Image (cartoon, grey):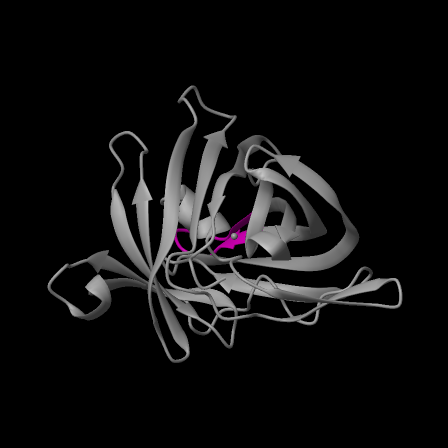
Amino acid sequence: MQLSIPAVRLATALLLGAIVSGAGAQTQEGPMAPVIGDKWTYQFHNKGDKREPYQYSHQVKAVDGPSAWILGESKEPNARRPRYVWRYDVPKGEVVELFEPDDAAPQGAGKRVVDRAKVDAWLQFPLSVGKKYTVKRAWDNGRGFDEYTAEVQAYEKVKVEGGEFDSYRIRFAGFWNQREGGSYAGRSEHLVWYAPAAKTTVRWQYTNRTSNGGSWNDTLTELVKWEPGAAN
């Protein structure tokens, strides 16, 4: 869920969903379609380095049948891609293709640089407290993969700068595995709070360790502003 792209890799995956309530239980039945104008602004901070936190935003620019097209803009200093375009797969409920921006191309999507169509989704519907499932995701560079056991731990309120939301707390615990230049592995964990009302993950903590157990990444991504499109 490494966004912006460390931020893009981690948090953009978890966009959009619908909630159904009944008999004291909360169940997330499946993803719902985004609408044009939906916009999320996040702050990303890698607590393991000395750089200041930075913000990035995602806004739905078009909806075309099973696909939504999302423009990303990053304020990361010296970002490799200050602007980018995601194709969001509505039935799957996840972003699946990343493109270089090209205003002259259909949907503003130029050259494709990432294809995640065949990786497991972070959110596997329906979601309910106590559910467990597995997630295996190949790295975008093809040099390895991550593998996790996911557990929906709670349905609770979480407060971030962008508001207070009823959220699913989901823990992904497992390992990263490198398969190029030798075989290496280390522990990795994500803890996310997914808020259906905001159609996104509003808080995402990520930590992993080197193959010898040392600290590697320690990042936090939070929603700082949620702007629904006019059709909501």
Query: So how many labels did they put on this image?
Result: 0
Q: Quadrant of residue 124?
A: bottom right
Residue furthest to the left in view is 104
Q: Is residue 150 left or right of residue 88?
A: right
Q: Quadrant of residue 208?
A: top right
Q: Position of residue 105 (x, y in %)?
A: 14, 67
Give the vertical position of 101 relative to 127 (above or below).
Answer: above
Residue at x 61% of width, y 55% of height: 197
Could one spot residue 28 in this view of the protein? yes
Could one spot residue 207 in this view of the protein? no
User: 183 or 124: nearer the eye?
Assistant: 124
In magenta stretch: residue 3: no
Residue furthest to the top in view is 50
Q: Position of residue 179 (x, y in %)?
A: 45, 57
User: 78 or 226: nearer the eye?
Assistant: 226
Residue at x 89% of width, y 68% of height: 23
In magenta stretch: residue 181: yes
Q: Position of residue 36 (x, y in %)?
A: 37, 63
Q: Position of residue 62 (x, y in %)?
A: 32, 67
**Magenta-tinted stretch:** 176-185
Residue at x 30% of width, y 44% of height: 73
